[in-house]
Image (tube, grey):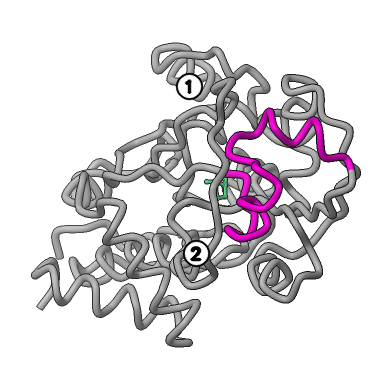
Amino acid sequence: PTLAQQPIVVGSKTFSESHVLAEIAAQYLEAKGQIVERRMGLGGTLISYEALVQGELDIYPEYTGTLTGAVFDDPTMDAAGLSAALAKDDLEFYLRLGFDNSYAIAMPEDLAASRGITQISDLAEHPELVVGFSHEFLNRGDGWPELQRRYGLSLRPKGIEHALAYRALDAGQLDVADAYTTDGDLDLYGLRLLDDDLEFFPTYDAGYLIRQDLPSNVRNTLSELEGVIDEPKMRSLNRRVATDGLSPALVAFEFLRDEGLVN
Ligand code: PBE
């Protein structure tokens, strides 16, 4: 065998895109002869990041804006600053998969139209709106506390499991929620994504965050996944989980097969 046989531990955060991307890495490495252990659905960003630092994980999918905003609390950090900050923890944002998955603020289209709301700053005049945000968004450096400050909003958001947010908007239980821009079921619900007119949200390029001590043959194998997923592709993979009810492992398997990455 050309690859080291020490197991490589691949993990994910709790939402389905993270799970699909982790499965893509895990199954691709396995197809090349690498033994892999899985720790999927570990927790939120900080738990996953810490697990990587502690060596409980070797690889998990992460996003540039999440690292600068939520882990390092410095949204102004550039690519070089991010590499340096990660290197201090013996980590590396190893490769970009080819898409951006940002937070966005979503409202039902007809509600937004009837109140004349097109951009986030318009929310300042609508304190009556019922707002639900995903738990992590409520507390992150690139989330609600800073968004509220930047836009001067006086809304009172409550926490909601992200997987339930679109249905709650659809059922009229919520007026406003945070969306993830590559969510597969986003299009189904007739939502308006409000323009981020003060350019609050950073870019969230997706990629694999790895430990620097990852063996070079594993790195080389992983590097073959650079740029393989664009935004429409990621949305369609997420739709397979959210709408078709397939497991992230099956969606990852079919992706690798259909792209000719494994046979
Ligand atoms: N995101 C959008 C979040 C969840 C989806 C990429 C900014 C994150 O995991 O950081």
Q: Is residue 108 magenta?
A: yes
User: In the picture shown, does residue 32 fall above or below 250?
Assistant: above
Q: Which amino acid does label 1 sit on?
A: Ala
Residue plotted at (79% across, 43% down): 138
- The label shown at residue 186 is 2
For the record, the magenta segment spans 104-127
Q: Is residue 189 magenta?
A: no
Viewer-nearest residue: 194 or 71? 194
Answer left or right for 230 relative to 185: left
Mark 1 vs 2, N-terminal side? 1
Q: Mark 1 points at which residue?
A: 87
Q: Quadrant of the N terminus?
A: bottom left
Answer left or right for 204 relative to 156: left
Viewer-nearest residue: 80 or 232? 232
Residue plotted at (51% across, 27% down): 202
Residue 55: x and y in percent read 57, 46
